Amino acid sequence: ILAGGSGTRLWPMSRSSKPKQFLKFDGKESFLQKAVLRNLACMELDDVYVVTNQDYYHDVKKQLLEIHSTLAENIILEPAKRNTAPAIALGFKYIEEKKACPEDEVFFISPADHLIDPLDKYKNYLFSCEKLAKNGGIITFGIR
């Protein structure tokens, strides 16, 4: 889950000191927490990682600990803010090296600042896309 963005598109609610992924619009969970919970409905706890930068480490850690005590171990820190592609590459490299993933492992990259509903459709799409990815496909989700 990518959680290093500065959230400038939702200004003035979202600012660099408190970007969109940490906001709780419904008063319950932040965008980040919703992303984590949504993905935990589809995968194992030790398969969910959050890539962020040093500036947001404590916010990410606090919010992950509200979900599960071991999730804070799954934070990957970017050495510098470099946008989406380098954050994804860092996540791949970290997981490849630290988790000793097989070459045919399927990776799913998710932003931390999206609202996605309903969960059952999301899960169905993920599982059907996993089959395509295992056959070498690259799948992207988006909105028309």
Image: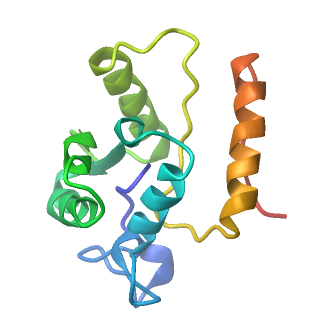
The answer to whether residue 71 is left or right of residue 140 is left
- Considering only vertical position in the picture, is 86 above or below 144? above
Specify the farthest residue to the right.
Answer: 144
Q: Nearer the viewer, residue 26 or 141?
A: 26
Q: Quadrant of the C terminus?
A: bottom right
Residue in the picture at 44% in, 85% down: 11
What percent of the width, then of the height, locates residue 141? 72, 50
Give the quadrant of residue 136.
Answer: top right
Q: Nearer the viewer, residue 14 or 135?
A: 135
Residue in the picture at 47% in, 45% down: 84
Q: Nearer the viewer, residue 13 or 96?
A: 96
The answer to whether residue 111 is left or right of residue 121 is left
Q: Nearer the viewer, residue 7 or 137?
A: 137
Q: How is the image coloured?
A: rainbow
Residue in the picture at 43% in, 57% down: 36
Count of labels shown?
0
What percent of the width, then of the height, locates residue 21? 40, 69
Specify the farthest residue to the top.
Answer: 103
Give the quadrant of residue 15.
Answer: bottom left
- Considering only vertical position in the picture, is 18 above or below 82? below
What percent of the width, then of the height, locates residue 25? 45, 87
Q: Is residue 139 visible?
A: no
What percent of the width, then of the height, locates residue 12? 40, 90
Residue in the picture at 23% in, 75% down: 17
